Image (cartoon, rainbow, N blue to C red):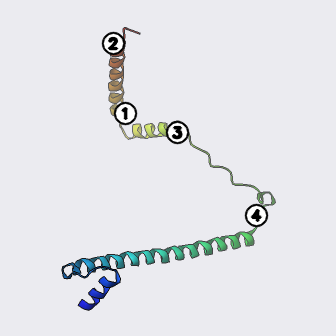
Amino acid sequence: MLSGLQQLHAYWGEAYVASEAEALLSRVHSFAASFGKACRDNEREDHMRKKRAEAKAAAAKRAQAKGPSRPSQAGAAKPAARAQPAARSAMGNIQMSLKRGEFEDMKKLQSELQTKIQSRRTYTAGAHGGR
């Protein structure tokens, strides 16, 4: 085994130092683990690529066998999904929180914010000469 380590050092173009044998074994182990992971990743990618190609071919075969159900559907595109405006979803969030019984908390928060805004307005008006 010692001769194998010496040969490995020579193969890598390094001078053999007996005290660095464990470091060499650690590097070999790290390389082997990384190489194994890379091989596994490559195999997985090849497998997934084949699966995608098979699925695409099967879908094309099903579409060809099925054909359009109505003549007007042959060239028609799917209708676009209706976008929900942000305000509507925000109102839905508020309504759901009110349904959960957070109405009193919301009222307290609203009053706190109103007092803060009012105090900032008076402070700003006073600091800038009442503009």
| Marks 3,2: beta carbons within 8 A | no
| Circle 2 residues within 10 Å: few <14, some 14–19, many ≥20 | few
Give percent across and percent down for residue 102. Answer: 35, 36
Q: Residue at x 56, y 39 (%)?
A: 85
Q: Quadrant of residue 36?
A: bottom left
Q: Which residue is mark 4?
A: 69
Mark 2, mark 4: which one is toward the viewer? 2
Q: Nearer the viewer, residue 107 or 1?
A: 1
Mark 3 to mark 2: distance in Å?
37 Å
Mark with earlier residue (3, 1):
3
Separation of disc 3 and disc 1 at Cα?
A: 22 Å
* C-beta proximity under 8 Å, tags 2 and 1: no
Which residue matches tag 2? 127
Residue found 22% across the figure and 80% down from its top: 17
The residue tagged 1 is: 103
- SS at circle 3: helix
* Mark whose residue sits in front, 3 or 4: 3
Q: Nearer the viewer, mark 2 or mark 1?
A: 2
Q: Residues within 10 Å of mark 1 (few under 14, many from 20)?
A: some
Image quadrant where one finds the C terminus: top left
Q: Which residue is mark 3?
A: 86
How far apart, in angstroms, are the residues tagged by discs 3 and 4?
Answer: 37 Å
Q: Residue at x 34, y 14 (%)?
A: 122
Q: Nearer the viewer, residue 115 or 95?
A: 115
- Specify the farthest residue to the left: 19
Residue type pointed to by label 3 = Ala
**Does 2 sit above or below residue 26?**
below
